[in-house]
Amino acid sequence: MDVTKEVLRVLDEVLSLQGRSAAFARDTPLLGAIPELDSMAVVTLITTLEDQFGLTVDDDDIDGSTFATVGSLADFVSGKLAA
């Protein structure tokens, strides 16, 4: 499974980006750079990632750096999957 590709799909779905995520790369900034990614969207994104990947994300697992870039979010998901 290509985790980055799946994370991009979830981002597009949750943030209603209408395909804009197809142009995103691993170094594309997220938090603070995409207006749609506000605090409520972060909660929805976490919940959707949990559902899509079968993960459990604890409050202590995440901070702002998790959502810094597409790559940091994909690496977070990969790390949770490997645990």
Image: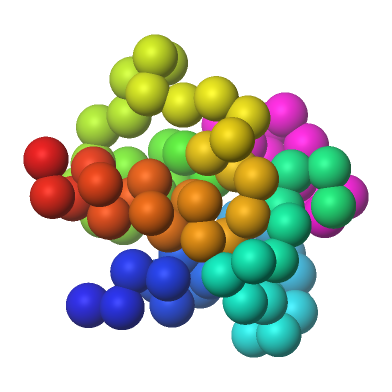
**In the image shown, does 8 or 82 lie closer to the viewer?**
82
**Mark count:** 0
**Image coords of residue 51 (percent x, y):** 31, 48
Q: Is residue 71 above or below residue 51?
A: below
The answer to whether residue 48 is above or below residue 11 is above
| Residue ranking furthest to the front | 27
Q: Where is residue 22 in the image (x, y as percent from the top left)?
A: 64, 85
- Residue 31: x and y, percent? 74, 43
Whether residue 63 is situated above or below residue 21 in the rendered picture: above
**Residue 36 magenta-highlighted:** yes
- Asked whether, in this view, residue 51 is left or right of residue 28, the answer is left
Q: Is residue 54 magenta?
A: no
Q: Which residue is drawn at 54% across and 45% down?
A: 45
Quadrant where the C terminus sits is top left
Task: Name the spot of residue 46 as percent of width and height, x first.
Answer: 47, 39
Kindly identify the residue that appears in the image at 38 percent across and 54 percent down: 75
Residue at 85% across / 52% down in the picture? Answer: 33
Left/right of residue 19 with respect to residue 11 in the rendered view: right
**For this rendering, which residue is in front, 72 or 15?**
72
Q: What residue lies at 33% left-to-right and 69% top-to-bottom? A: 3
Q: Which of 16 and 79 is in front in this view?
A: 79
Instruction: Using the rendered view, name the quadrant where residue 29 is placed.
Output: bottom right
Is residue 65 at least partly visible in the picture? yes
Magenta segment: 34-44
